[in-house]
Image (tube, rainbow, N blue to C red):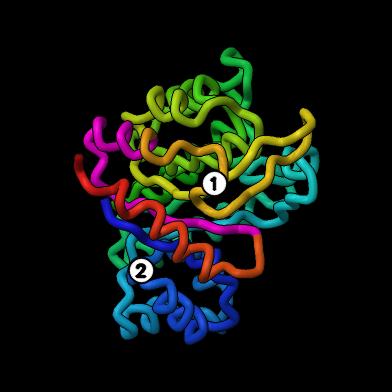
Amino acid sequence: MRLAICSWSLQATSPADLVEKVRATGIPRVQLRLDDVAEDPAWADAPAALREGGVELVSGMMQTRGEDYSTLDTIRVTGGLLPDEHWEHNRDTAARVADLAAGLGLPSVSLHAGFLPHDAADAADHPLTRRTGAVADLFADRGLDLLLETGQEDAATLDRFLDAADRPNLFLNFDPANMILYGMGDPLAALRTLLPRVKQAHAKDAVPAAEPGTWGTEVPVGEGAVDWAAFLEILRGGGYDGELILEREAGDARVDDLRAGAAELRPLMRPA
């Protein structure tokens, strides 16, 4: 396992700023948000700038249009591939992102598909199942994996959904903090269940919500409820040898928090 950084964690204002902040973390590997690169001319040179700056690109990420994370209720309605008003745009963006990722030689792209159907009988013919399958096919046509990020559902629901979508290139980006933030169960138990489907893992931490139906709180790695020693041991036991990608989506000291998270994880990543 090697450490990497989520590019969006650094809140960079330009490709040059992103390179500078990545260097400041001391971790020269990045999962790069690709929808901005594909659609915003100001970010078109980001992959070249990173590589010229000695930063390795390990995978991509795509964010869908219209997501509103204000509350659990708003993201349930607006998240991922489900909103009809954004489906055509998101499908077309996925095709551009897949072309870009293939051109960059990346193995995979992750995204939040949205709140998955919790009823097993409903999953096979649910619009989100069909749309996720269609996007996975776009990536398969370019030789890429599509990784769904965990968190908005429990492990059993996600397992059933992947069976219903039934695509050989559809896997998981496992984020333990998201399960805590959404109140979707023990991330260690979920990882054991889902491990055969995990192709990438995020290192993000959180504490549970004080009241049901509200957000948990994201905190720097090492300050939350994730048992990182146990988390890494489960990954190792399953033969996982991909990146462990640090993500920070809150706070005003992102570089410092990522550096501290890396310091927390590095001793635990060494084989016993």
Question: Which quadrant of the structure image shows residue 29?
Answer: bottom left
Residue position for label 1: 205
Residue 184 vs residue 268, the one in the foreground: 268
The amino acid marked with disc number 2 is Ile
Measured as percent of width and height from the top left, residue 260 is found at: 46, 61
Measured as percent of width and height from the top left, residue 234 is found at: 32, 31
Residue position for label 2: 27
The mark that comes first in sequence, 1 or 2, is 2
Residue at the image position 40 percent from the left and 22 percent from the top: 193
Classify 190 as above or below 101: above
The answer to if 24 sits in the magenta stretch is no
Residue at the image position 55 percent from the left and 58 percent from the top: 248
The answer to if 238 sits in the magenta stretch is yes
Q: CA distance from mark 1 to mark 2?
A: 18 Å
* Residue 154 in sight from this viewpoint: yes
Helix, strand or loop under label 2 = loop
> What range is drawn magenta here?
231-250
The amino acid marked with disc number 1 is Asp
Q: Say few, some or many: other residues with alpha carbon within 10 Å of mark 1 (under 14 / 14 to 19 / 20 or more).
A: many
